[in-house]
RNA sequence: GCGCCCGUAGCUCAGUAGGAUAGAGCGACGGUUUCCUAAACCGUAGGUCGCAGGUUCGAAUCCUGCCGGGCGCACCA
């Protein structure tokens, strides 16, 4: 899936900020000698354009390091600085900040070098090359329990996992998305027994097993189990049969899991989730005993209250005693830690994973800390393997309470997405009655497609636009708003730019590839600067795995574009003269559209040409 | 009890490897609009960054304590 490296593309690290930092580092080395240690973190974008575009804050810490005055140091670095092609002479401000202002000529060259869209590629890389040494990354995401229907609790893991996977793929890594579904456990005994007792005819044709409503099926089975002792016994016997590998029971179990997975994949399809590998807990069943054995041979396992335990350092129980990670129950059964360990071992040893990312809610933080500690103790995860718990907060309703139905039940993901599309459709229809509205001419099919894209995107974008770690409030009103940092705004911003080409009577793809860009008007320069930050943002998002930095950037870029195109603040585009200027400005439109489209792609969001 | 996370404008949220006067959006008020679909643009008002100390040339950001909210703390996942 990784795009071919072409001679035109830049390395991921060749953002303007990195370019600038290299110059600063060599200037500092020349001016201050090699004993001065320079930190990349000292170079940042300014928070106010009047200080230029980037600021280097290193003079102050260096002053302490070297025992000199900060402003003198800043002056020395500035004097040694060779930047004529890149930016204006640096200015020294305040106590010793070095301010850099990019030159429009440099920006123009930088943007001109972005190659045209490769029509054969899955997505547009805007000239950014993949990393030279890819990681083998496993993203553990979504992972619903097959006994039940997917609910809102799985939304964030699925949406965030997909985005993170795409971002890492874009960076050039080899990414596998793994759906670690719950397809094993005692509740399956109950479900299979219920299936046997209530739908014997369904068992005759397991390939076509259908359960219309898994949630109801589970509830009925539970009720059956609670109210009928004979059935409860039968359910327990079924668990034994299942665990004992009884062929008939296994067949039914398999058919049940397949049917449940079909429900899941309907949701994944609606969400635009791509390339997800279903590899459930049961996959590791025959490895569990060996996992415990191997850990035992390593001398890590202790018997405690009859259970097999590992005690990583630094964890305590409620009573202050050492807290174990339980890997086998006193009755010989296994737990989710056992399966997690087996899965991690498999991913590292068999799949060659060098990085494993678990997209799981923040309440499981401690579990992952302990689990990772054990993987390190066992040596299964060595220094060459990164383990990350990408923890996310809960979805809350408008009043800040856990997201539930009015009746207090869990909200099915299917229903939530259907509602999103329905609400988006209402917005589309609201304007369609107006004969003046362009939307009035849209076909029914197109309106349906718009509603679907807008609705689903709204849900995903709202999720990704928030800091992962904190809880966030789910609000239809906010996510579907056409103003502010929302999917509808971004999709519309994109559609508008595409529409400019139509009105100009051109196709962006036909613009001459290397044609020079003219950057003179402040709005033009500001837009160019925003565009030029794209590689920097991608790099940062790939490092930090923070999609909200990307949404923020895209929104900022769109606003710069609005100013650029604004009647009063901006410049003429379609009727700009001479022709070279018109082309230059249309190319800026195109680059903006491409950056938005790629950015949204990395969030797992499709664009629309009209809406 | 121990541990972790959170507390930023009326509302929803950015911003934490320390950096200049803490930013957006929504809502409110005022203005603009011969190129895209008025779903735009410009401006005004709005803040003891929970509180109190500390470290530092410099703290929303790091440390300590407190207040308030959430979550977790061995045979469920």
Image: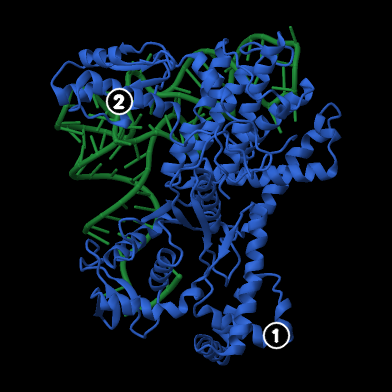
Chain colours: A blue, B green
Q: How many marks?
A: 2
Instruction: Identify the residue shown where x is 79% and y is 22%.
Output: A505
Question: Which of the two marks, 1 or 2, is nearer to us in this view?
Answer: 2
Left or right, residue B56 beside residue A280: left
- Check disc 1 and report the residue beneath it: A203
Left or right, residue A287 beside residue A111: left
Residue A575 at x, y percent in the picture? 74, 12
- Foreground residue among A440 and A528: A528
**Is residue A361 positioned above or below A56 on the image?**
below
Does the image show residue A335? yes
**Is residue A288 positioned above or below A425 on the image?**
below
Which label's residue is closer to the chain start, 1 or 2? 2
Left or right, residue A486 beside residue A95: right
The disc label shown at residue A25, or none: 2
Residue A124 at x, y percent in the picture? 61, 38
Quick check: marks 1 and 2 in contact, CB under 8 Å? no
Do the residues marked 1 and 2 share a common chain? yes
Residue A114 at x, y percent in the picture? 57, 28
Which picture quadrant has residue A594? top right
Specify the subunit that label 1 lies on: A
Q: Residues within 10 Å of mark 2 (few under 14, many from 20)?
A: some
- Foreground residue among A432 and A120: A120
Residue A264 at x, y percent in the picture? 63, 63
Q: For mark 1, give the secondary structure.
A: helix
The disc label shown at residue A429, or none: none
Instruction: Identify the residue shown where x is 56% and y is 60%.
Output: A408
- Foreground residue among A372 and B43: A372
């Amino acid at each position: 899936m990784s795009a071919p490296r072409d001679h035109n593309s830049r390395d991921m690290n060749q953002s303007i900020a990195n370019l600038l930092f290299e110059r600063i580092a060599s200037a500092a080395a020349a001016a201050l000698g090699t004993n001065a240690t320079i930190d990349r973190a000292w170079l940042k974008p300014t928070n106010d354009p009047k200080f230029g575009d980037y600021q280097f804050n290193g003079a102050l810490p260096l002053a302490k390091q070297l025992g000199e005055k900060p402003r003198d140091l800043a002056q020395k670095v500035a004097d040694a600085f060779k930047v004529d092609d890149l930016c204006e002479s640096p200015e020294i401000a305040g106590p010793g900040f070095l301010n850099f202002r990019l030159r429009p000529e440099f920006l123009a060259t930088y943007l001109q070098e972005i190659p045209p869209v490769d029509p054969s590629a899955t997505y547009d890389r805007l000239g950014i090359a993949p990393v030279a040494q890819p990681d083998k990354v496993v993203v553990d995401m979504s992972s619903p329990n097959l006994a039940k229907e997917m609910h809102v609790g799985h939304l964030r893991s699925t949406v965030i996992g997909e985005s993170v996977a795409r971002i890492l793929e874009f960076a050039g890594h080899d990414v596998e998305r793994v759906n670690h579904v719950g397809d094993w456990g005692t509740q399956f005994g109950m479900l299979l027994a219920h299936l046997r007792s209530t739908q014997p005819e369904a068992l005759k044709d397991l390939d076509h097993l259908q359960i219309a409503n898994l949630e109801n099926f589970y509830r009925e089975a539970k009720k059956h189990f609670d109210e009928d002792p004979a059935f409860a016994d039968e359910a327990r016997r079924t668990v034994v049969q299942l665990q004992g590998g009884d062929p008939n029971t296994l067949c039914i179990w398999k058919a049940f899991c397949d049917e449940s997975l079909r429900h899941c994949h309907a949701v994944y399809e609606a969400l635009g989730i791509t390339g997800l590998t279903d590899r459930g807990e049961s996959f590791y069943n025959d490895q569990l005993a060996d996992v415990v054995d191997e850990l035992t041979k390593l001398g890590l396992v202790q018997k405690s209250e009859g259970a097999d335990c590992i005690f990583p350092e630094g964890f305590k129980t409620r009573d202050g005693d050492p807290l174990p990670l339980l890997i086998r129950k006193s009755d010989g059964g296994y737990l989710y830690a056992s399966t997690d360990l087996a899965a991690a071992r498999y991913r590292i040893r068999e799949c060659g994973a060098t990085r494993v990312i678990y997209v799981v809610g923040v309440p499981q933080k401690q579990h992952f800390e302990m689990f990772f500690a054990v993987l390190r103790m066992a040596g299964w995860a060595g220094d060459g393997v990164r383990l990350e718990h990408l923890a996310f907060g809960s979805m809350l309703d408008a009043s800040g309470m856990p997201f539930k139905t009015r009746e207090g039940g869990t909200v099915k993901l299917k229903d939530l997405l259907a509602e999103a599309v329905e609400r988006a459709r209402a917005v589309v229809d609201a304007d369609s009655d107006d004969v003046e509205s362009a939307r009035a001419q849209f076909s029914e099919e197109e309106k349906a497609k718009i509603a679907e894209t807008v609705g689903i995107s709204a849900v995903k974008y709202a999720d990704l636009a928030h800091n992962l770690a904190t809880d966030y409030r789910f609000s239809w009103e906010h996510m579907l708003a056409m103003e502010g940092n929302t999917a509808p705004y971004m999709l519309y911003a994109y559609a508008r730019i595409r529409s400019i080409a139509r009105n100009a009577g051109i196709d962006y793809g036909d613009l001459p590839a290397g044609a020079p860009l003219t950057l003179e008007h402040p709005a033009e320069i500001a837009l160019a600067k925003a565009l030029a930050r794209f590689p920097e943002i991608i790099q940062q998002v790939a490092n930090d795995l923070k999609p909200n930095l990307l949404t923020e950037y895209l929104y900022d870029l769109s606003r710069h574009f609005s100013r650029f195109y604004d009647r009063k603040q901006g410049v003429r585009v379609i009727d700009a003269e001479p022709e070279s200027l018109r082309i230059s400005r249309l190319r800026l439109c195109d680059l903006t559209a491409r950056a938005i489209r790629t950015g949204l792609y990395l969030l797992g969001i499709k664009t629309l040409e009209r809406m």
